[in-house]
Image (cartoon, rainbow, N blue to C red):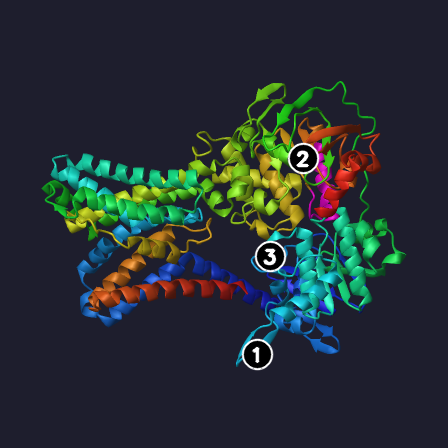
């Protein structure tokens, strides 16, 4: 009897360990695999920089996506928001606006696009999937219209120089992503707003009866998602050096994958910022690794899809095993 | 079942339970929530494997059942949350998994004609007068339950386990259910009937087994025991029948809550006014659908109202949204804990703290920080005050019994220092012991000067707890009784006064 109790307790704590560090484990595993397969390339100082730089856009979008999934919704428009706010910023900069103002206005544009998503979800009562599927196309279309379907480049040197900086191998882009993650971790853990969003994600009706203004919180969630995508737009602009009208196409898939791999529940109400950052890094490492192993870009898509399904399945499998 | 033991990490859910079911009897399983009834049922249905002990089914001995073993040996469970598939027709629900087939050329196709024929027979047995092709989503709860029973018959089950089947049924529906149960008994089925309602047990049961805290208390013939005996067996103490003060007189007491001319656009509440005085508990009786819950929801601002004024301690209060109401000191313990009460993804302390945090914030509940110590303090206070049974306030709320979940919900409102508390069916699905605790708490709150309003469909509950009882009929208060003058007969008479019309509704709903 005592022996059995012990086993049960051990498995219980193993489950807790998995929940807390499972994604970290996947990340470590992937890094080890890479290090074994390509030791000469892997142990280079630029590896960390490259992984972080490739991951930061993804992490930023995923952070916003996390909130949309947390309220049992979804935001499919994030890729288009990245492109439109990026294009808007680029246009401002090439027409002489100072980079700082252009960046702020670009992020504000992201917020407004999120606001629009939120207003549409609230006023129609439709599922965010449908609304953001529509706005995804609309925002992309607007990007094509304002850019005349061509890329915009030639930004002030100050902007590109700043974005290319790194501190101890850590690129500015990653610092921005981590800073945003810290702010949002604070929001989810320490503020009433964050707590209410979790409550809302768990049970909208109970939330309403508990005095939570459901529509206001939904609106805020979509604004957060828009802001994150707007910031991702800045980072992408800095990395690529130009604003492409087709930029960030399909990025919502990576963002959703990062959030889910990071342990966010698709049914709402459960998930952590730390997990999302891990999820974003995992996707970045997979991308980086495939480039390192010279997997062709066409095959990369296939591998990425398979890995997403595989890692989430693994997570569910382990969680389910331990529940018995 | 012999000496069945089930242990979960940290808890022994069942210790040495012996339980038998004979063909052609109704064996009632009785016990408070958390007594082990659900665990026992889950062992029989193959969800859990017992830690030790044996199960003997029609001569075959098992140390544990799989869901398949359970089905193959003729056990069917009718859960409280029905498991019919809304999107399918009645006949498809009955035969899902073993559809009758016929050969069409060399492929097997579903034999709809045969299925319909079978379904008709089965529906006749359970007394459901519906076309087998009706979609289940169009049925009432009681009709869905009949479909579930028919489904068990379709699977040729010998043992039917019914988990609190009468919880959401009206009295005429219960009468109908009992008729079906008696019929099944005659056909030699063994029925395990899980219930809290002692009156029902006396009416339908042949034998009764009482469980308490996972242990076996005893098995008795129903004809040999009284309701009081059963209560004593369940809780180990006698529950006194009344929670009012003797000779209480509220006529001179201060009015602490008043509603004037409340009307809803949908016509479910028409020009209702009432007053609540300090120390008084005011109850609302009436048929299901008479507008009591709708009125409370409109007072609380969870649902819109067309007109009407609300006064709290003499001050006019807006209360147009739950947020405003909470700020004004209103609280609402809703009827459905799972849907509108708690947050399944939160532990006990988060469930409690969500409300005071919102009440003490600004900007629609969005502005402000979470204080972990404050949260801990609120949760511990309420755990003490309400005697919430848990090993830690970090425990998930879904692990608690219904009574303890209800205490957590009450705790969140008390932590927010609510002044006027609306209870909508406060003891629905809660065991007798916890009921008593909740009644005592309600009286204590009233004595402290807080306002207590109760909506209940259980007349004994209203009579035991309330000082004044108002009767609702079709959106209006049609009668108000002082507790001393109120009897079950009078309340029923008032709520069903227009006989012809009301009878019709009763038999349909």
Q: Which numbered disc covers residue B103?
A: 1
> Separation of disc 2 and disc 3 at Cα?
30 Å
Which element carries disc 2, helix, strand or loop? helix
Q: Would you say B175 lies left or right of B142 here?
A: right
Q: Which numbered disc covers residue A117?
A: none
Instruction: Check if residue B428 falls in the magenta segment.
Output: yes
Q: Earlier in the sequence, mark 2 or mark 3?
A: 3
- Closer to viewer: mark 2 or mark 1: 1
Residue ID for mark 2 = B292
Q: Would you say A321 lies left or right of B284 here?
A: left
Q: Quadrant of residue B385?
A: top right
Front-lying residue, A143 or A318 = A143
- Closer to viewer: mark 3 or mark 1: 1
Report the magenta residues as a range.
Answer: B427-444
Q: Quadrant of the N terminus of chain B?
A: bottom right
Q: Are marks 2 and 1 on the same chain?
A: yes
Q: Which numbered disc covers residue B135?
A: 3
> Separation of disc 3 and disc 1 at Cα?
26 Å
Q: Earlier in the sequence, mark 3 or mark 1?
A: 1
Task: Tell me which residue sits at (83%, 54%) in the image.
Answer: B203
Task: Tell me which residue sits at (23%, 36%) in the image.
Answer: A104
């Amino acid at each position: 009897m005592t022996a059995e109790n012990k086993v049960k307790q051990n498995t219980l704590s193993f489950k807790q360990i998995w929940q807390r560090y499972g994604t970290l484990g996947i990340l470590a595993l992937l890094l080890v695999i890479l290090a074994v397969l390509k030791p000469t390339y892997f142990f280079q100082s630029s590896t960390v920089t490259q992984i972080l730089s490739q991951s930061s856009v993804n992490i930023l979008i995923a952070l916003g996506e996390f909130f949309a999934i947390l309220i049992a919704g979804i935001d499919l428009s994030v890729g288009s928001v990245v492109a439109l706010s990026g294009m808007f910023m680029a246009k401002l900069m090439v027409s002489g606006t100072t980079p700082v103002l252009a960046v702020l206005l670009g992020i504000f544009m992201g917020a407004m696009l999120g606001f629009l998503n939120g207003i549409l979800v609230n006023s129609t009562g439709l599922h965010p999937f449908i609304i953001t599927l529509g706005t995804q196309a609309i925002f992309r279309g607007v990007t094509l219209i304002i850019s005349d379907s061509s890329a915009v480049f030639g930004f002030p040197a100050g902007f590109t120089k700043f974005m290319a900086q790194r501190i101890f191998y850590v690129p500015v882009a990653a610092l921005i992503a981590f800073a945003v993650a810290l702010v949002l971790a604070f929001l989810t853990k320490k503020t009433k707003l964050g707590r209410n969003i979790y409550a809302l994600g768990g049970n909208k009706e109970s939330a309403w009866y508990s005095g939570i203004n459901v529509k206001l919180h939904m609106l805020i969630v979509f604004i957060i998602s828009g802001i994150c995508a707007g910031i991702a737009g800045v980072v992408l602009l800095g990395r690529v050096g130009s604003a492409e009208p087709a930029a960030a196409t399909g990025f919502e898939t990576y963002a959703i994958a990062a959030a889910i791999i990071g342990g966010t529940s698709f049914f709402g109400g459960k998930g952590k910022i730390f997990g999302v950052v891990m999820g974003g890094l995992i996707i970045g490492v997979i991308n980086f690794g495939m480039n390192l192993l010279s997997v062709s870009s066409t095959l990369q898509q296939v591998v990425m899809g398979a890995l997403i399904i595989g890692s989430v399945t693994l997570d569910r499998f382990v969680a389910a095993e331990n529940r018995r | 079942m012999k000496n069945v033991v089930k242990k979960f990490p940290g808890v022994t859910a069942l210790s040495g339970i012996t339980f038998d079911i004979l063909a052609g009897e109704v064996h009632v399983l009785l016990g408070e929530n958390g007594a082990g009834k659900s665990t026992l049922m889950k062992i029989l249905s193959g969800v859990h494997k017992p830690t030790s002990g044996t199960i003997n089914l029609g001569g075959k001995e098992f140390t544990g059942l799989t869901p398949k073993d359970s089905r193959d040996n003729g056990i069917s469970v009718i859960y409280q949350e029905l498991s019919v598939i809304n999107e399918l027709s009645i006949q498809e629900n009955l035969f899902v998994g073993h559809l009758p087939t016929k050969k069409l050329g060399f492929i097997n196709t579903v034999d709809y004609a045969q299925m319909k024929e079978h379904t008709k027979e089965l529906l006749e047995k359970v007394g459901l007068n519906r076309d087998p092709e009706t979609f289940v989503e169009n049925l009432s709860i009681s009709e869905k339950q009949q479909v579930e029973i028919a489904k068990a018959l379709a699977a040729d089950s010998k043992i039917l386990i019914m988990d609190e089947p009468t919880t959401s049924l009206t009295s005429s529906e219960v009468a109908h259910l009992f008729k079906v149960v008696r019929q099944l008994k005659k056909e030699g089925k063994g029925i395990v009937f899980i219930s809290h309602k002692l009156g029902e047990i006396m009416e339908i049961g042949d034998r009764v087994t009482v469980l308490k805290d996972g242990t076996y208390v005893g098995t008795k013939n129903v004809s040999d025991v009284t309701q009081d005996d059963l209560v004593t067996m369940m809780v180990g103490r006698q529950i006194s029948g009344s929670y009012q003060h003797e000779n209480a007189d509220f006529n001179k007491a201060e009015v602490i809550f008043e509603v004037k001319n409340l009307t809803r656009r949908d016509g479910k509440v028409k020009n209702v006014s009432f007053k609540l005085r300090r120390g008084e508990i005011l109850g609302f009786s009436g048929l299901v659908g008479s507008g009591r819950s709708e009125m409370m929801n409109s007072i609380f601002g969870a649902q819109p109202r067309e007109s009407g004024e609300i006064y709290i301690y003499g001050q006019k209060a807006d209360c147009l949204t739950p947020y405003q109401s909470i700020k004004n000191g209103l609280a609402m313990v809703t009827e459905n804990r799972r849907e509108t009460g708690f947050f399944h993804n939160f532990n006990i302390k988060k469930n409690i703290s969500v409300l005071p945090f919102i009440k003490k914030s600004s900007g629609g509940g969005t502005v402000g920080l979470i204080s972990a110590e404050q949260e801990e303090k609120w949760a511990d206070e309420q755990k003490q005050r309400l005697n919430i049974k848990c090993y830690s306030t970090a425990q998930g709320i879904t692990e608690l019994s219904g009574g303890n979940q209800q205490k957590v919900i009450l705790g969140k409102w008390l932590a927010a220092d609510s002044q006027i508390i609306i209870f909508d069916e406060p003891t629905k699905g809660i065991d007798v012991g916890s009921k008593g605790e909740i009644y005592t708490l309600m009286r204590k709150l009233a004595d402290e000067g807080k306002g207590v309003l109760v909506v209940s469909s259980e007349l004994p509950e209203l009579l035991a707890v309330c000082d004044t009882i108002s009767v609702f009929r079709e959106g209006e208060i049609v009668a108000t009784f002082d507790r001393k003058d109120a009897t079950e007969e009078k309340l029923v008479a008032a709520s069903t006064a227009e006989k012809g019309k009301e009878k019709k509704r009763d038999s349909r709903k």
